[in-house]
Amino acid sequence: MTGPARIANGLLTDPDRPVGFRFDGRSFLGQHGDTLASALLANGVRLVGRSFKYHRPRGVVTAGPEEPAALVEVVGPGGREPNRPATTLPLGEGLVAASQHRWPTLTFDLLSINGVFSRFLPAGFYYKTFMAPGWAWERLYEPLIRRAAGLGRLQPVAGAQAAPAETIHDHADVLVVGAGAAGLAAAHRLGTLGLRVILAEQDEVLGGGALQDARWDTWRAQMDARLRRLGSVRCLTRTCVVGAYEHGVFAALETLTPAETAAFGGLRERFRIIRAQRVLLTTGAIERLIAFAHNDLPGVMQAGAALSYLRRYGVAVGRRPAFFVNNDEAYEAAIALHAAGVEPIVVIDARAESRAAERARAQGLDVHGGAVVQEARGRGRVRAVRIVDRDGRSRELEADCLLVSGGHSPWTALASQSGASLRWDESIAAFTPALDAASGCVAGAARGCFGLARAAADGDAAARALAAGLGRSAVAVAVDPALALPEDAEVTPIAPLWEVRGRGPAFVDLQNDVTTDDVRLAHREGYEHVEHMKRFTTHGMATDQGRIGGLVGSAVLALARGLPVAQVGQPRPRPYLQPLPFAALAGSDVGAHFKPKRRLPLHDAHAAAGATFVAVGLWLRPLVYSTETGWGPVLKEARRVRRSAGVTDVSSLGKIDVQGPGAARFLDFVYANTISTLAVGRARYGIMLREDGMLFDDGTVARLGAEHFILTTTTANGAAALEHLEFHLQACCPELDVVLTDVGDQWAQFAVAGPRAREIVAAVVPGIDLANEAFPFMAAAAATIAGLAGRLFRISFSGELAYELAVPAGEATGAWRAVLEAGRPFEIAPYGLDALNTLRIEKGHVTGAELNGNTSADDLGFGRLLKKQGDFIGRTLSRRPGLAAPDRLQLVGVRPLDRTKRLRNGAQLVAPGAAGTGLGYVTSSTPCVLEDGWFGLALLAGGRQRIGQRLHAVAATHGEQIEVEIASPHRLDPKNTRVHS
Amino acid sequence: MLRIRCPWCGVRDEAEFRYRGDASVRRPRGDAGLAAFTDYAYVRDNPRGWHLEWWLHVGGCRRLLKVSRHTVSHAIHAVGAPDDHLPPPPDGARE
């Protein structure tokens, strides 16, 4: 047995393949093809969860992704996944699922007492109540609320076990969203006209509303087969378009079947980014609820859902159903259930008479015209309905389920996101969208064209119009007689009905427990705008985005405001239209693939030398050539540089080649100091400002020819500097003939530094006289380096005699080895980023910690570099008096008086005994290389005037306070004798 | 995500471009003074409607593009080189 309520064979289910599953610890049998919801209903299970706020009992309400109530946790070997709608959860063998929001058990829920006190838990309750005392929020209120509310429990699966996902980029001429009658007809037409079409359907099969009517089975099957034969149409089932973005970009989530998951190595989802020239929205319409007392009782369902369960899964949702409707479309479910042998069936129709009522009566159904349901009655499930007859008499009818239809609202979410305007259509009592022709169009029930034949014709017409707009004419294509459409029944129009006032809560949002009284409260408290009401009550903010009750909430608000619904409008549902797992959004960009790693050309050589690497932006740079932690190995590397020689890799610096007749003028414009006077064969330190006068970046500029320069930028700013130069060249200096080329990846560059550097470099760079007079400090030249065509610069970051050797990146290892070989007599060794920092801090060179975007040239002591003549970026605003104010934070050196005390980056500098804010802070700090004690750089208010003063450096996070002396930032060799030696 | 038709590369995703601000603002002459440069650095209109902007194709040809974009609908009606005069935005611009 696969459930006592299984009365027929379903379209999707296979009675010969029973599937075992567990729900809340009980074992059941379903059929292959079932969803969890259909299998539970087949087994007579009504109560499937408790509500979010009041812990009211809830059952299955719908048969699709619009489900507000039947949310369950799926328990797998790897973890628990909450908030899965049972209505879309495929029943796999061995599925284990559990209800949510109940404590301790589903049938006996202690917190349902919230429901009794619901008059004290109105909308906005949390905002108003848990206000004071302040400490109580974190320790008392929040834990309590989380226990009481909480949308399930997430137990993530970590690491390698996490299910992989992938991102797919799709392109199409037309994206058709929704494969109902309109979508199928449209995709077929577009495909036969040779357009590339993606047809995205959230359901597991094509058909949409056409699945509900047996007369359409032949047409549906034919369309399905034809579409699959058309090479130009791709049908993506289980693919929900979850967001519409500008310029024809859409996001969609494709969920794989268990068989596909097994075939693709555990892949569960594909996140698709679809780019389409046009979109055709055939998203259909969603049946809406009617608000009446206890309309959330298990057994109160949507009328269309009852038809879905019968057609798709062969399940009767009740033995003695009552219907509450205000439109003809809803009768299809009643007539189908009756034809399947379910009786007696009673229909309560708010309209006095209708064509559908006549048809129903003719088949033996009991129809009460002009009546309404005031209340669903029963404890834990529907036992009866209280109705008010057309003559005003109230009475109770026995029923085991109540199937409701308040009309059908076009699902306009994607249209709204695509920029559609919404128009109120009185004939269907709902909003319909109209899209700008440049983006696409809306067809079928999604624009209020109800009836399958009408929708199919509308889809076809829309497709022809779209094709014509894309230059494909549809004249020659005749309609295939095999595809003749069954006729639509004549219908009597809907009579709008939103709420039946009675005793007891009437819900407009079952997932967030929002009642019509909450909407009226929002109005009384001044939240009149529909978007404000939404946020005050949380109506429509749950995972179902208020699909079945959204418009009802708007209508209740409209009535309270005394306005037509058309004027009140409805809130715009934002992406994503269904919950997405973060894993799907991340795709394959996880772990090592989260971001690219940039390896230096000499990476392997560093690794072979035992380097520990550190990530600097995307770069991996050698931090220290040791696996030991602590300052020992760092200082060993730095001392070798100060005493003899070391070599370090600086290839990650940005390198920009600048050529052209206008190059010198352009560089004068982008650098704050003068570049044009630089002689060929010489280099210069240069600073760039932003237009607001603050420092942007620094580096060296070398002139290799009259019209040829090479710049270096900081590692962090490589890309930003190139962008800065390109922008200013093209926007401000279009008259200059200059070409910028990023050569950062073409050149490896390393610095040989130390008193013995000249001898070492001489051995690998023959043919250049390195004597001071011939190749002085800041000289630059093309050079043959270890047999490679390279460049030699005499520049220094360490404060020592130093050369930088640039060689083609692909052949750098040979040059690097040659340097190490030539330096062997001097015990040369590579030094890492830590030692590099140690050396530069002692020398007073600035880096990112000081070039932090808030410092001016004057702050860092570069004021005298700014050229007096000629325009440059930042010139005017750098002269603002405030940027030269004497109390600005200025660069200084800091030396603890107690040589055993360490200095900390970020330590605040305060006057002894002073309270309040500090005078500045330490930006960089290091143990001294050749002496005891620490030294640091700091930004200090009026710092240059304070040299010689004593302050306290306070590192509150370490509980440290030490006395320091303010000094020049240039601790090492302020007269630059070493670099000139 | 915007899709921008680069005159040199074709239609490309926004991710390839870097936004560089209001293209109707021109850098003043170097001697224009503090007030002019303060305006240039800090003062911008924030129009609801058509907006002329700089987009630098950093992930492509590195050319600077002048783009006319609608700040509400994000529609782009013209793209050109920095010194191109773009056609005026369509009448009855969409709100």
Image (cartoon, coloured by chain):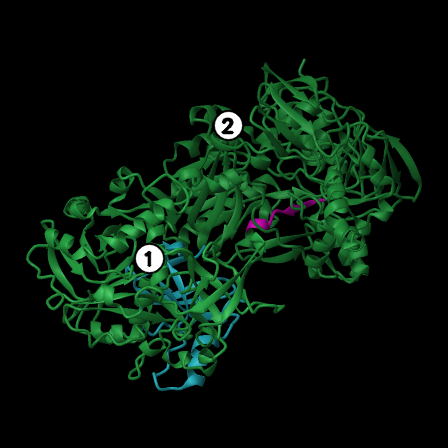
Residue for point 47% across, 67% down? A965
Type of amino acid under label 2 = Thr
Residue A466 position, x and y percent, is 44, 51
User: Where does label 1 land, which residue?
Assistant: A839
Chain under callout 2: A
* Picture quarter with the N terminus of chain A: top right
Chain under callout 1: A
Whether residue A852 is visible, yes or no, is yes
Q: Which residues are magenta?
A: A407-414
User: Where does label 2 land, which residue?
Assistant: A257
| Mark 2 nearby-residue class (10 Å; few <14, some 14–19, many ≥20) | some
Type of amino acid under label 1 = Leu
Q: Earlier in the sequence, mark 1 or mark 2?
A: 2
In the rendered image of this protein, does residue B45 appear above or below residue A720?
A: below
Asked if the magenta segment contains residue A413, the reply would be yes
In the rendered image of this protein, does residue A547 appear above or below residue A78?
A: below
- Chain A: its colour in the image is green
Asked if the magenta segment contains residue A854, the reply would be no
> Who's cyan, chain-wise?
B
Residue B3 position, x and y percent, is 40, 56
